[in-house]
Amino acid sequence: MSNLRSYAYPGAGEFARDTMHYSQAIRVGDNIFISGQGGWDRSTIEIRPELTDEVDQAFDNVDHALKHAGGKGWQQVYRVITYSTDTRATHDRIIDNFRRWMPHHQPTWTEIGVRELGLDTMHIEIEVQAYDVEGAKEAEKGKGEGGVNGVVG
């Protein structure tokens, strides 16, 4: 799929690309697909110790991944899937973050409870899809970010 632009933001994104062979974001036409973002520090990949901080950081990481892929962030998100090891503990904080990050629209949302996530210390992971017509036009012109095989560091 070398015709699709993929993105790996510095720190955790590059680590995932280099060690686990996946991208943080891929553009498909007018859409940006974001891989699951946890509540990790983007530089150290350490998970926030407090659950509410972990949820907040995961939302921030989604915003960062979208913007790194040339999007405008949460304002373009139309679909959200959350994975949580304790949906009762994260549910209300997720809704608080929806209201904070998307005050003018409501996306679709699927909330999934899971036994474990990719890192032993993770309790939340957020996957989104965003609609970005303007960024897609820039990427088509070759002005969007890109690199070898479309992978961005």
Image (cartoon, rainbow, N blue to C red):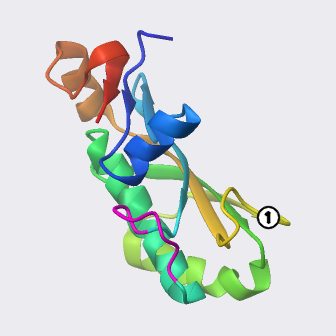
Please give the residue where the numbered disc 1 appears in the rendered image.
116
73 or 41, nearer to the observer: 41
Quadrant in the picture for residue 57: bottom left
Which segment is the magenta one? 41-48
| Callout 1 amino acid | Glu
- Residue 128 position within the rendered picture, expressed as x and y whole percent measured from the top left: 54, 50
Q: Is residue 146 left or right of residue 130?
A: left
Q: Is residue 111 above or below residue 3?
A: below
Quadrant in the picture for residue 131: top left
111 or 44, nearer to the observer: 44
Q: Is residue 125 left or right of residue 15?
A: right
Would residue 122 be counted in the magenta stretch? no
Would residue 47 be counted in the magenta stretch? yes
- Residue 54 position within the rendered picture, expressed as x and y whole percent measured from the top left: 53, 78
Q: Is residue 9 left or right of residue 34?
A: left
Residue at image point 68% right, 73% down: 123
The answer to whether residue 135 of the structure is visible from this angle is yes
Overall secondary structure of the magenta section: loop
